[in-house]
């Protein structure tokens, strides 16, 4: 595969030759709990990275704090394990100043949505060329099991023995509200889908947010089971494909239509008629449909959960605009001359 | 009429008015013309934190003080010889600083019953005899400006607003300042609005002519140029000087300059200034908050930029965790703290030196950083280059502790020759630096330079140097995660030793003692240099022997500092805090220094310090 597949990586040097997943494995022993969903994501990413076709030394993974944030240690790329919540800010400085890098952020629901919420929303609206992988396990793992900002209300945890009181964030809705140009959701256990979404994100110029439903088998085991069990998943989960009617169910019996009052709803295709089913449009300028889709799922039962790319639209990335501004000012004023800068406009001579 | 011309050796003028009266601009223009004449000068703006506090009230008073002379001066002056008061509030707020016999120019138009009541004057002080101690010039500045602008295509309101230019014209006549620079300035400032431009120029010229013709001013003053080393000069304010220093450091080292910043008084002007110089490749990033400002800078540093974050005390508090990360990552990073009155929001527009201990210790764990403090507005330029050198050569965060008075104060500056500035090299890592037991070549991100103890700066994009680092403790050398007790002990000591090693590259502190007999040393840091020097000069003029030294490197200290401290019977340390440097000196050198403190939001007055020194001399 050549870098042409990934226009967003056109300034990143290509790999000398073919690479394999093995090239991206570091020599560090992986220290997640056995059975943690992070393993599947790591393995999928290691297999996916060779597809980018870019030089390994030009890939950087930046993370915050939390279980997921150990991720960079296990990849043989450049990696920066930073402080809680700040990875998007750090990655913004790196990606803005180094267009020759492919920059990835690894974060979790606590890291990105609690302590780092501010940096996340601002990275999204700025559209810096970085790809954010948000591992959502709806719990705090590394601090041993407190509820997180994506935990369902009423969650019983160590810090909420009587049930949590706060309402949860929906990361996709949040990202769309924060002017994100690329928002997707996928699942740790569905390697094929995960890889497809990563590929689409890598091709996107600007910030991409990928929410990955990840199982924490120690503190919140089975949080995503309705979307994973072969008995329930097909009826619970809809796969969004750009340009395709939004249908799902074991027999594709469900579909999404627009109701008379303008909101969207899940209906039986047999009763609504095929013609009434909305086609997914990830490229729509208006984020309305994407947002409406993000609201369909029941946060408790996970019924009607969409996965796939909600939104993928073009808007110049912050780092590109920054470079262009520097270039255009330099063209207009000429390359700066230090001595004339020091002199300024108002000098006098003492002899 | 021909007027008497009186020669003066020095003058301190204070322009005071409402925040909306344009006093800072008036002061800046007067300064610029004064600089051009070759006087030595020093300025001190003093403005409220509110952008426009209610008009005519005491909190809304904005002032600009300028000291200029025919000889070398060190401070903006203790007390004004001339006060220009644009309204009763300005008079009331500033009169206490005015010595008897000083000139007082008041704008009578604003001394209305209502305005007098606003500030609690029971009667008009211009007429009630309460100003008899001063040489009062009652001038109807507003109405004369409006009169002068009759026939100009501006509203009455705009005509009234030009009164600051009228006052400027009058003062420029009074002190024989040239006009060309101000006229050029007005032409370019209002280029898009010719009516306003013409009105301001006319107001300026009317003020000048008024001085020439009125009998209210019988004397015109002249202040001869100061004798200064030959060369090309400009006037410079601290924040722009710091910005130029950063650009110079970027050019010298070949590292692109990246600023991550969140606006905060009094540091924002560095962000403003740097954002004007994109043709030097400067990248300025206005972040969503203080943490993102330093975060982005740290990211850029990781990528090989000369990375800077600018802030003031409250911002440093927010950045602390990220500074700790930079200490752990051992990456070059400049943290510029333009100190202001604290704690909390404190006094945003006033000056203070109370962040020294925050810079020194304000982080979790043992997290040493280097600290450099400029001593005058123009010195901010050289301090920035020196801090950048340390950051890059030692792969460490470095604090620059400026403050509000340096940031906004100005002085003439002998423009340096760009080619003669000190240089330093980034020396990025380019390949493996370690051979494994089996003979393979590896890269160890924490293998240190034996001389500096600095680790390699291995930036992404360098083949073969892929590595992972973070805020978790790293194994010495190889840099992988390590929770080993002995290793942690070693790493903590190594990080400290690296900062200590910087002392080998910083110059010894020098003592100024013209008599060679002094038994008392006055030791300061930062912006107190001017007032301390002026105070020592006063003491020496009165035949007192006193030595002066000023610390530029606050961490590590210069190697000879202990020896210097012990060479004197008494050491006096004046600081605009409650004794933060004094605490460090006592702790490190076991010398019982005398701490002299003031936290009034304003620089020390040299008279006051001279008194303190004299007391110590008398009690030896
Ligand atoms: S605590 Fe949960 S998220 Fe963390 S490593 Fe263990 S299983 Fe994974």
Image (tube, coloured by chain):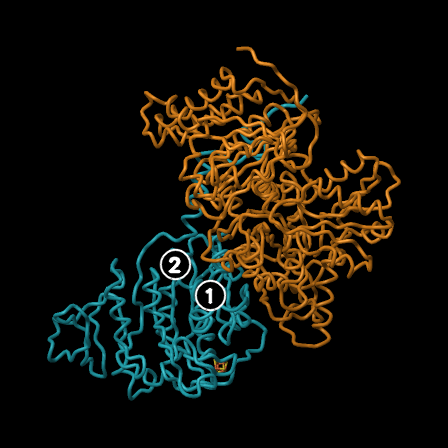
The label on residue A6 is: 2
Mark 2 packing: few (<14 Cα in 10 Å), some, or many (20+)?
many
Q: Position of residue A108 (x, y in %)?
A: 45, 73
Rendered residue at 58%/74% (across/down) = A28
Q: Relative to B258, is A128 on the left or the right?
A: left
Q: Where is residue B19 in the image (x, y as percent from the top left)?
A: 46, 40
Q: What tint does the image give chain B?
A: orange
Circles 1 and 2 on the same subunit: yes
Number of marks in the image?
Answer: 2
Q: What element carries label 2?
A: loop
Rendered residue at 31%/71% (across/down) = A308
Residue nearer the viewer, B341 or B163: B163
Residue B38's place in the image compared with B612, above or below, is above
Residue nearer the viewer, B22 or B266: B22
Chain designation of label 2: A
Q: Is mark 1 on a helix, strand or loop?
A: strand
Q: Position of residue B247 (x, y in %)?
A: 57, 42
Residue A341's place in the image compared with A87, above or below, is above
Rendered residue at 55%/11% (across/down) = B2
Badge 1 is on which residue? Answer: A105
Residue nearer the viewer, B319 or B354: B354
């Amino acid at each position: 595969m050549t870098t042409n597949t990934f226009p967003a990586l056109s300034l990143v040097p290509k790999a000398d030759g073919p690479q394999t997943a093995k090239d991206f494995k570091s020599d560090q022993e992986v220290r997640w709990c056995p059975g943690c969903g992070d393993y599947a994501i790591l393995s999928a990413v290691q297999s996916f990275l060779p597809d980018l076709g870019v030089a390994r030394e030009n890939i950087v993974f930046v993370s915050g704090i939390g279980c997921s944030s150990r991720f960079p240690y296990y990849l043989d790329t450049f990696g920066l394990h930073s402080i809680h919540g700040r990875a998007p800010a750090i990655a913004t400085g790196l990606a803005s100043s180094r267009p020759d890098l492919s920059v990835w952020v690894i974060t979790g629901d606590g890291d990105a949505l609690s302590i780092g919420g501010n940096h996340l929303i601002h990275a999204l609206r700025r559209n810096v060329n970085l790809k954010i992988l948000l591992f959502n396990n709806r719990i705090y793992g590394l601090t041993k099991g407190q509820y997180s900002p994506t935990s369902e209300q009423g969650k019983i945890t160590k810090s909420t023995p009587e049930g949590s009181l706060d309402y949860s964030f929906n990361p996709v809705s949040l990202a769309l509200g924060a002017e994100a140009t690329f928002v997707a959701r996928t699942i740790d256990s569905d390697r094929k889908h995960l890889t497809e979404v990563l590929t689409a994100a890598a091709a996107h110029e600007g910030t991409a947010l990928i929410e990955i439903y990840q199982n924490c088998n120690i503190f919140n085991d089975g949080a995503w089971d309705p979307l994973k069990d072969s008995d329930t998943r097909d009826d619970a989960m809809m796969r969004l494909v750009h340009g395709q009617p939004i249908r799902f169910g074991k027999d594709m019996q469900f579909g999404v239509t627009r109701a008379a009052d303008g909101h969207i709803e899940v209906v039986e295709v047999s009763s609504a008629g095929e013609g009434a089913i909305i086609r997914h449009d990830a490229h729509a300028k208006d984020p309305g449909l994407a947002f409406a889709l993000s609201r369909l799922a029941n946060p408790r039962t996970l019924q009607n959960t969409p996965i796939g790319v909600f939104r993928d639209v073009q808007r110049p990335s912050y780092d590109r605009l920054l470079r262009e501004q520097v270039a255009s000012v330099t063209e207009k004023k000429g390359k700066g001359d230090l001595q004339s800068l020091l002199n300024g406009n108002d000098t006098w001579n003492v002899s | 009429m021909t007027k008497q011309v009186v020669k003066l050796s020095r003058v301190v003028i204070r322009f005071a008015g409402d925040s909306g009266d344009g006093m800072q601009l008036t002061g800046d223009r007067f300064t610029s013309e004064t600089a051009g004449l070759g006087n030595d000068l020093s300025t001190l703006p003093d403005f409220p934190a509110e952008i426009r506090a209610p008009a005519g009230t005491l909190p809304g008073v904005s002032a600009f003080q300028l000291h200029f002379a025919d000889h070398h001066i060190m401070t903006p002056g203790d007390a004004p010889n001339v006060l220009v008061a644009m309204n009763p509030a300005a008079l009331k707020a500033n009169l206490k600083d005015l010595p008897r016999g000083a000139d007082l120019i008041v704008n009578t138009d604003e001394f209305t019953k209502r305005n007098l009541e606003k500030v609690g004057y029971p009667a008009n002080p211009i007429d009630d005899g309460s100003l008899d101690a001063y040489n009062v010039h009652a001038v109807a500045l507003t109405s004369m400006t409006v009169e002068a602008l009759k026939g100009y295509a501006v509203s009455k309101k705009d005509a009234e607003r030009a009164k600051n230019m009228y006052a400027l014209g009058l003062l420029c006549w009074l002190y024989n300042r040239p006009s060309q620079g101000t006229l050029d300035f007005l032409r370019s400032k209002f280029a898009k609005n010719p009516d306003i431009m013409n009105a301001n120029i006319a107001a300026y010229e009317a003020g000048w002519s008024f001085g020439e013709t009125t009998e209210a001013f019988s004397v015109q003053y002249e202040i001869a140029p100061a004798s200064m080393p030959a060369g090309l000069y400009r006037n410079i304010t601290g924040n722009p000087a710091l910005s130029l220093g950063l650009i110079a450091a970027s050019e010298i080292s070949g590292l692109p300059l990246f600023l991550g910043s969140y606006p905060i008084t009094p540091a924002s002007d560095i962000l403003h200034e740097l954002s004007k110089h994109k043709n030097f490749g400067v990248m300025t990033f206005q972040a969503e908050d203080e943490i993102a400002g330093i975060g982005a800078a740290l990211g850029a540093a990781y990528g090989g930029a000369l990375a800077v974050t600018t802030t003031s005390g409250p911002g440093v508090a927010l950045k602390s965790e990220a500074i700790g990360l930079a200490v752990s990552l051992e990456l070059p990073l400049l943290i510029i703290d333009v100190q202001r009155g604290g704690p909390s929001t404190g006094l945003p527009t006033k000056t203070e030196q109370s962040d020294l201990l925050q810079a020194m210790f304000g982080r979790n764990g043992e997290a040493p950083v280097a600290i450099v403090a400029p001593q005058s507005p123009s010195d901010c330029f050289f301090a920035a280059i020196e801090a950048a050198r340390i950051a890059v050569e030692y792969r460490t965060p470095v604090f620059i502790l400026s403050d509000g008075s340096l940031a906004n104060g100005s002085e003439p500056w002998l423009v340096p020759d760009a080619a003669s500035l000190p240089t330093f090299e980034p020396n990025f890592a380019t390949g493996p630096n370690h051979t494994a037991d089996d003979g393979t070549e590896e890269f160890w991100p924490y293998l240190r330079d034996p001389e500096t103890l600095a680790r390699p700066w291995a930036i992404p994009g360098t083949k073969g140097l892929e590595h992972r680092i973070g805020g978790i403790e790293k194994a010495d050398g190889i840099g992988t995660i390590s929770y080993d007790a002995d290793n942690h002990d070693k790493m903590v000591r190594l990080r400290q030793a690296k900062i200590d090693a910087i002392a080998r590259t910083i110059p010894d502190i020098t003592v100024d003692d013209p008599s060679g007999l002094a038994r008392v040393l006055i030791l300061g840091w930062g912006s107190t240099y001017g007032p301390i020097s002026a105070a020592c000069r006063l003491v020496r003029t009165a035949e007192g022997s006193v030595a002066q030294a000023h610390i530029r490197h606050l961490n590590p200290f210069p190697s000879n500092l202990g020896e210097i401290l012990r060479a004197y019977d008494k050491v006096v340390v004046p600081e605009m805090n409650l004794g933060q440097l004094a605490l460090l000196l006592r702790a490190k050198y076991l010398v019982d220094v005398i701490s002299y403190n003031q936290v009034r939001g304003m620089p020390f007055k040299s008279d006051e310090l001279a008194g303190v020194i004299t007391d110590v001399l008398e009690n030896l």
